[in-house]
Image (cartoon, rainbow, N blue to C red):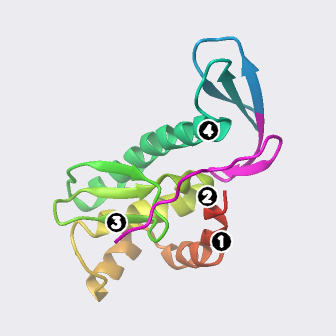
Amino acid sequence: MRRYRKNINFKNNSEICFLGEKCTITFIQTPTLKSFVIKSGKTLKVFRAFDSVQTYSEILENYFRQEAKKIIEKRVNYFAELIGENYNQIYIKDTISRWGSCSSKRNLNFCWRLVLTPKEILDYVCAHEVAHLKHMNHSRHFWNLLESIFPSYKDARNWLKINGKKLHEF
């Protein structure tokens, strides 16, 4: 059974890596009817409507999920085209034990926290899961295919082993 994390807790004026760029999170109360996030330079401005039931952290997580969906879809499409494979659906989740997975129904699942990594790490996970569309295992054929579409996969894999746990501390 997969575990999912709840109660994300981002802090005002803290620094976070967003697609490889250090950004400062700034919380702002706003009289608007809708909460939203704006990336302005190296600042993520989180605007919370006065009557919002969402916390600043929930607003920011929703923003990260939306950005993850857009970016991951583009990168998955790129790698899928490289190997001539199609997928069914992409799902964005908050898994603790996996960065991505590929189901027998050709659905691809990704952890939204990948947007908190450098772009090449997100690319590695996308390429890895796309390679599973051709080889649903970790055989030599799988690793050879992955290396052909993402030659630096070993470095990215090591980065996740070293730094991945930090991304689940929010």
Q: Which residue is mark 2?
A: 117
Magenta region's main secondary structure? loop
Image coordinates of residue 157 in percent, x first then y, are 53, 76
Looking at the picture, tell me which residue is in the foreground, 77 or 97. 97
Height in image: 42 above or below 161? above
Label 2, label 3: how far apart the Cα atoms are:
17 Å
Q: Which residue is mark 4?
A: 60
Image coordinates of residue 124 in percent, x first then y, are 47, 65
Height in image: 76 above or below 69? below
Work out which quarter of the rendered image holds the C terminus and state it.
bottom right
Return the disc, 1 or 3, that comes first in the chain's sequence: 3
Answer whether labels 1 and 2 touch (C-beta < 8 Å).
Answer: yes
Looking at the picture, tell me which residue is in the foreground, 58 or 140. 58
Amino acid type of the residue that numbered disc 1 sits on in the rendered structure = Asn
The residue segment tinted magenta is 1-26
Return the disc, 4 or 3, that comes first in the chain's sequence: 4
Instruction: Nearest to the eye among marks 4 and 2: give it.
Output: 4
Instruction: Nearest to the eye among marks 4 and 3: give it.
Output: 4
Tag shown at residue 163: 1
Farthest left residue in view: 105
Assign a secondary structure to mark 3. strand
Label 4, label 3: how far apart the Cα atoms are:
24 Å
Return the disc, 4 or 2, that comes first in the chain's sequence: 4
User: Residue at left 35%, top 57%?
Assistant: 109
Instruction: Nearest to the eye among marks 4 and 1: give it.
Output: 4
Farthest bottom residue in view: 140
Height in image: 113 above or below 74? below
Q: Is residue 25 left or right of residue 157?
A: right
Within 10 Å of the Cα at label 3, are there few (<14), some (14-19), or many (20+) other Cα atoms? some
Q: Which residue is mark 3?
A: 101
